[in-house]
Image (cartoon, rainbow, N blue to C red):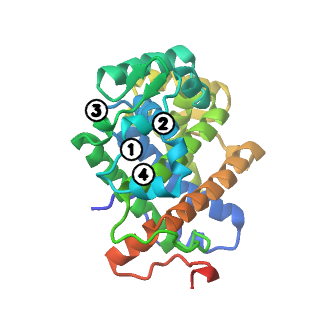
Amino acid sequence: MVNGARSGRPLGEKHTDLGRRADPAARDRQIAYFAFNFVSDMAAHGIPGLKPLEAVLLMAINQANIAALTRDPAARSRYGALENAAPDEERRPVSVRAVAASMQLPYETARRNVRRLAAKGACVIGELGVIVPTAFMTSAAYMEAAQLGHERLHGLYRMLSAGGLLEPLPPAHYHEPEPPIRGAVRLMSDYLLRSAETVGARSGDLTAGLVLLPLLAAAVGSEGSPPSAMSAGALARRTQLPAETVRRHVLTLVEAGTCVSGPGGLALAEGILDAPTWRGLLRENAMAVQRLFAGLAERGVVDAWEQITGQGGPAQRSSSSG
């Protein structure tokens, strides 16, 4: 079953209708509603056995390891299928310091989490840096997680396209008989990391961004009414972060005026989404979502989805697609 975005609010006609309105700001908010719930799902439940921060770091390390391969069309084709992971000798090690800087984490926090990943067999630390080994990328646990992430991604595509929230997509450069799951997950990972970075930059750090995401999703999905508040306990369950970690970051977000605390719990402060910083976040996210699905279309993923489901697909294609 395809897993859709989660929230305390059901998905329905109001969301679909909103996507077709002419107001660009309303469209950005609706895209953010689906996308931020998707990012929260993937951070909290993306890789079984890993904590959210570990999962994000693992994703960042792997993306750095294969960055050169993603620029090589032959390599993209060679390592697109789920069962075909790039071998260790083709993975470029990355330093813990570089990963910490890219994810806006203190070096010691990144180093501690990378060592935990190494103890779990998810990373190998060498003289030149860190890699995510092929053995982990082809493990049953990871491949199951990749399959589930791909299903969530397909679900996001279906919701966005059904709501008229995607611009015309480019034609496929690759023609696949079935979705290239590993290739799709690489593109998805780029989007997830960019989302974590942009929200974290506005909220203080990566962990604060993970705490804030469910509150942002609730606010953009409220359609003019006050968003549903969430208790600190509910936020801890939603994010899969330790309760004390959530409590500490919630206090910081409240002190910064980003969130408010009331009898019903925590919510985004009134008017925050009208501020240029947060309006800019929603606009950047909408553009990033479009880039994500344009990349998936070029990679042949969208065509493969449509072939499997037997539908023409509600998202339009550019005229060059023929």
Marks 4 and 2: CB-CB under 8 Å? no
State the residue in front, 200 or 116.
Answer: 116
Q: Nearer the viewer, mark 4 or mark 1?
A: 1
Earlier residue among tags 4 and 3 = 3
The residue to which callout 1 is attached is 86
The residue to which callout 2 is attached is 65
Q: Nearer the viewer, mark 4 or mark 2?
A: 2
Please give left or right for residue 44 compared with residue 258 in the image. Answer: left
State the residue in front, 239 or 188.
Answer: 188
Earlier residue among tags 3 and 1 = 3
- At mark 1, the secondary structure is loop
Earlier residue among tags 3 and 2 = 3
Q: Residues within 10 Å of mark 2 (few under 14, many from 20)?
A: many
Marks 1 and 2: CB-CB under 8 Å? yes
Q: Is residue 158 visible?
A: no
> Relative to 249, is 172 above or below?
below
Q: Position of residue 250 (x, y in %)?
A: 54, 27
> Relative to 115, is 19 above or below?
below
- Inspect the image, locate mark 2, and give the three-letter code of the amino acid beneath it: Asn
- Inspect the image, locate mark 4, and give the three-letter code of the amino acid beneath it: Val
Q: Position of residue 317 (x, y in %)?
A: 57, 78
